[in-house]
């Protein structure tokens, strides 16, 4: 909906303050101000004004991740590029964007000498709408004709996907946005030959056909959310071939940026929830178990729905944490005894209840989970608490919550913080994995000797290659790892599969289990033989297993691979970034010697005939 006068004043004030911050050299502060002031449905021109401020920002100082994105489509997209750049920057990228010439998508993809390929993209957005698919069937056509037409349309898209995946590009493809008008009226979506019927089947078949390395953007859902009549403005289409109305461009750019962030490992990981008046109505300490609004009445049903939404997020891999100003016993009472609660204590990886300020509590939650503050999304009904967190923890995403709990879900969803490109079994178990980690920490408190504690865990590791089951999980771990990622490399699943077939490369994964449970896939390695060196091209590890001897176990595993190949040296690489300071001293701690520098990447070496590193992790061969 259009912003009211108060909101527009707030937006303009935010842009002005960001401009002033930039003038004083504060790029980080300017970005925080823009993040607070600008939303996906902010006026198109205001979003353009905000986007222009990016030219004055220091991407290196902000620790932004480079991204080379090419866009190819059969509609005018020039106006989308600055908005997309803006939202990608807010998502953590320093984007370089190439827009292929108008209506040259097929030629740009299939011609290896095209400007698109000369640009060298990491990711290609094939921008399609319903106009790009030949699915108009004559009235009376049967189901066979429908399936044939849709099959040909999917095959045409798959040919472009394969061409791009073969070059190591991640592909972003739109599904079809259903038009608002059709001469067939209701039959357009109720008859086998109807155009809406065909487009709906196409969207389902695209979802079924998309292989690893192809991410679908649900354009039709965006059109429905914005309003189909507002999504498309025929004046802009007839005059300049704008497939999406300018006023919808911010929502589109924001959605694409959040999906790209998810595909590249920059989606948020943890939802931190206040309790009183957030997960139920009222204050449990004052109103008691029978007095809170949960289950009965409109408000009670709204809180149940919000809990169910949080539970659904947890079931698909988002970590839940609780943060409440309360006594722990009192705060936990509804989760233990209220008959209408959807969430239970075991759904939270961390449960914090106390009387300190919430900024400190969020720092503690992030430290306990061993994730960055930029992985947190904070939900609290109290505007004062939200303001404190915004001021003191600008990296935390703070949801602006409405007063009516019926709109809580929409407020949380508007940020699209948790977009993901894939789903794996480990995702569903993530809260359990972090909760088990908390049990390990409690267990550790009983030991004075660290080695005795590690021995008591009974850690067993299994190792393997990039087999079809583990390949997507290897790619996902590499893509989303930031702190324990020594080089910041982000190969796609298709690129990793190609490396696994190359005799010069070794692709390995490590899974770990112990007395408290199965940690799942916790490490991935891409190793390359270069003469007598085995080069550690990529080494990523889940921070859940830090300081348990897994680093030493992994180094010994790589040492064994170097010997198997007849190499004389294991060569490690570390490329510093704003996010991987955690592993800055890893090679030195393992006894590697400095071996020079290569274009900003520090090199470390150790002889292949050295003794393996001692570790309490046992290899379950």
Image (cartoon, rainbow, N blue to C red):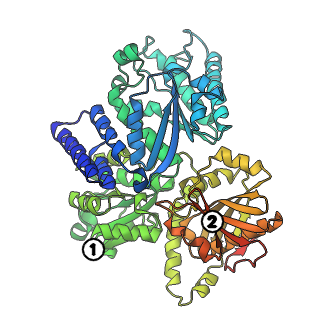
Residue 215 position by quadrant: top right
Q: Which residue is mark 2?
A: 596
Count neighbours of disc 1 (C-alpha within 10 A) and say few if under 14, some if 14 to 19, many if 20 or more: few
Q: Which residue is mark 1?
A: 356
Query: Can the viewer see residue 400 in this picture?
Result: no
Count neighbours of disc 2 (C-alpha within 10 A) and say few if under 14, some if 14 to 19, many if 20 or more: few
Q: Is residue 290 left or right of residue 425?
A: left
Residue at image location 36% in from the left, 58% down from the top:
395
Residue at image location 55% in from the left, 39% down from the top:
123
Look at the numbered disc 2 and give the secondary structure of its residue. Answer: strand
User: Along the line of sight, which residue is nearer the eye, 565 or 286?
Assistant: 565
First of labels 1, 2 by sequence position: 1
Residue 397 position by quadrant: bottom left
Query: Can the viewer see residue 466 in this picture?
Result: yes
From mark 1 to mark 2, how far is it between C-alphas? 48 Å
The quadrant the N terminus occupies is top left
511 above or below 308? below
- Residue 192 % position (x, y): 56, 18
């Amino acid at each position: 909906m259009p912003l009211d006068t108060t909101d527009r004043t707030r937006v303009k004030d935010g842009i002005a303050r960001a401009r002033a911050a930039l003038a004083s050299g504060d790029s980080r502060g300017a970005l925080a101000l823009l993040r607070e002031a600008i939303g996906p449905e902010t006026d198109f021109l205001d979003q353009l004004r905000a986007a222009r401020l990016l030219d004055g920002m220091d991407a290196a100082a902000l620790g932004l991740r480079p991204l080379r994105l090419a866009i190819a489509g059969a509609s005018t997209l020039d106006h989308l590029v600055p908005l997309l750049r803006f939202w990608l920057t807010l998502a953590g990228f320093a984007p370089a964007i190439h827009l292929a010439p108008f209506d040259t998508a097929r030629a740009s993809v299939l011609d290896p000498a095209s400007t698109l390929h000369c640009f060298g993209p990491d990711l290609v957005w094939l921008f399609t709408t319903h106009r790009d698919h030949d699915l108009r069937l004559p009235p009376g056509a049967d189901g066979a004709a429908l399936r044939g037409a849709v099959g040909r349309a999917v095959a045409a898209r798959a040919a472009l996907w394969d061409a791009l995946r073969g070059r190591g590009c991640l592909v972003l493809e739109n599904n079809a946005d259903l038009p608002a008008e059709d001469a067939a009226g209701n039959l357009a979506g109720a008859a086998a030959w109807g155009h809406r019927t065909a487009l709906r089947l196409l969207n389902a078949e695209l979802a079924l056909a998309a292989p690893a390395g192809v991410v679908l953007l649900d354009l039709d859902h965006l059109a429905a959310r914005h309003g189909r009549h507002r999504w498309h403005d025929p004046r802009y289409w007839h005059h300049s071939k704008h497939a999406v109305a300018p006023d919808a461009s911010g929502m589109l750019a924001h959605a694409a940026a959040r999906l790209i962030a998810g595909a590249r490992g920059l989606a948020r990981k943890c939802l931190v929830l206040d309790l009183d008046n957030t997960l139920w109505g009222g204050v449990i300490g004052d109103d008691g178990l029978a007095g809170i609004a949960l289950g009965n009445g409109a408000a009670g049903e709204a809180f149940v729905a919000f809990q169910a939404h949080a539970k659904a997020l947890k079931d698909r891999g988002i970590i839940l944490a609780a943060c409440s100003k309360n006594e722990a016993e009192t705060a936990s009472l509804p989760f233990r005894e209220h008959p209408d609660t959807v969430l239970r204590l075991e759904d939270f990886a961390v449960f914090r209840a106390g009387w300190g300020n919430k900024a400190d509590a969020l720092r503690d939650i992030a430290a306990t989970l061993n994730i960055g503050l930029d992985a947190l999304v904070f939900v609290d009904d109290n505007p004062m608490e939200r303001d404190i967190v915004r001021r003191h923890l600008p990296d935390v995403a703070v949801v602006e919550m409405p007063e009516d709990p019926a709109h809580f879900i929409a407020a949380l969803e508007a940020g699209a913080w948790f977009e993901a490109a894939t789903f794996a079994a480990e995702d569903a178990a993530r809260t359990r994995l972090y909760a088990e980690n908390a049990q390990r920490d409690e267990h550790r408190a009983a030991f004075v000797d660290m080695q005795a504690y590690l021995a008591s865990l009974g850690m067993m590791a299994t190792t393997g290659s990039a087999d079809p089951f583990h390949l997507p999980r290897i790619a996902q771990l590499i893509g989303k790892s930031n702190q324990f990622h020594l080089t910041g490399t982000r190969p796609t699943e298709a690129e990793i599969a190609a490396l696994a077939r190359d005799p010069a490369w070794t692709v390995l994964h490590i899974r770990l289990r112990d007395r408290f449970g199965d940690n799942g896939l916790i490490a991935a390695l891409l190793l390359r033989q270069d003469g007598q060196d085995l080069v550690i091209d990529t080494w990523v590890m889940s921070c859940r297993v830090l300081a348990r001897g897994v680093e030493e176990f992994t180094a010994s595993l790589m040492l064994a691979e170097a010997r198997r190949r007849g190499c004389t040296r294991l060569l490690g690489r570390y490329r510093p970034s704003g996010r991987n300071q955690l592993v800055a001293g890893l090679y030195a701690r393992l006894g590697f010697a400095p071996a020079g520098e290569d274009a900003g990447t520090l090199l470390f070496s150790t002889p292949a005939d050295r003794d393996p590193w001692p570790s309490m992790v046992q290899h379950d061969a």
